[in-house]
Amino acid sequence: MVTYEMKPGRNFMIRLPKGGDILNVIEEFCTQEDIRSAALWGIGALDKAVIGFYDGKSGEYLPITVDGPLELASCIGNVSMKDWKSHVHLHAVLSDREGRCYGGHLMPGSVIFAGEFYVRSLTGSPPERQPDAETGLSLWSKGEKS
Ligand code: ZN
């Protein structure tokens, strides 16, 4: 297990801009505010979503494109460091007009219709992502290289 003890930092409520790519928008906000670690919670709606299912055998995210309109019924995630930059990791549950849900790892190409996010930044030495040989994922590590 890899653990980091963090302290509460600044708190933000942010309204996301219509038409933006959700991952880019939050990553740019974090870079601008020098947020290196945070917890994220959001709701809203998307015009289009790209979610991924991680295939542990191939070591790849299999993308699923869901055309909107969609409710962003629930979105949670975190910010940590990857390649010396703030990196946003989000998972989303999306619902369509019948209330059917899709869920997965949010990928580039997910377009905001509207979004309200709570960003709780954390202070202390931020978690850093490194390639993990066992899973093929980029996971939090403490300097150990696989
Ligand atoms: Zn994920």
Image (cartoon, rainbow, N blue to C red):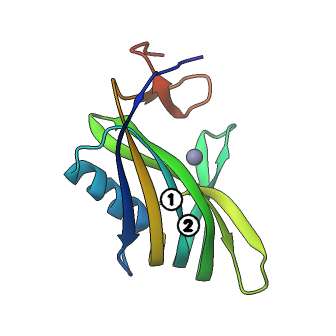
* 105 or 42, nearer to the observer: 42
Position of 127 relative to 77 (above/below) = above
Task: Kindly identify the amino acid type of the residue bearing the numbered disc 1.
Answer: Met
Judge the density around disc 1: few (<14), some (14-19), many (≥20) Cα neighbours within 10 Å: many
Whether disc 1's CB lies below 8 Å from ligand 1 is answered: no
Residue 80, quarter of picture: top left
Position of 47 relative to 6 (above/below) = below
Judge the density around disc 2: few (<14), some (14-19), many (≥20) Cα neighbours within 10 Å: many
The reply to whether residue 109 is visible in this rendering is no
Task: Kindly identify the amino acid type of the residue bearing the numbered disc 2.
Answer: Val
The reply to whether residue 100 is visible in this rendering is yes
Mark 1: secondary structure: loop
Residue bearing mark 1: 107
Residue drawn at x 52%, y 25% is 132
* Quadrant of the image containing the N terminus: top right
Residue drawn at x 38%, y 71% is 15
Residue 68, quarter of picture: bottom right
Residue drawn at x 54%, y 74% is 44
Horizontal side of 69 relative to 126 (left or right) equals right
* 35 or 131, nearer to the observer: 35
Separation of residues labelled 2 and 1 (CA atoms): 5 Å
Horizontal side of 88 relative to 34 (left or right) equals right
Label located before the other in sequence (2 or 1): 2
Mark 2: secondary structure: strand
How far across and down, in percent of the image, does residue 142 sit? Answer: 42, 16
Residue bearing mark 2: 50
Q: Are discs 2 and 1 less than 8 Å apart at CB? A: yes
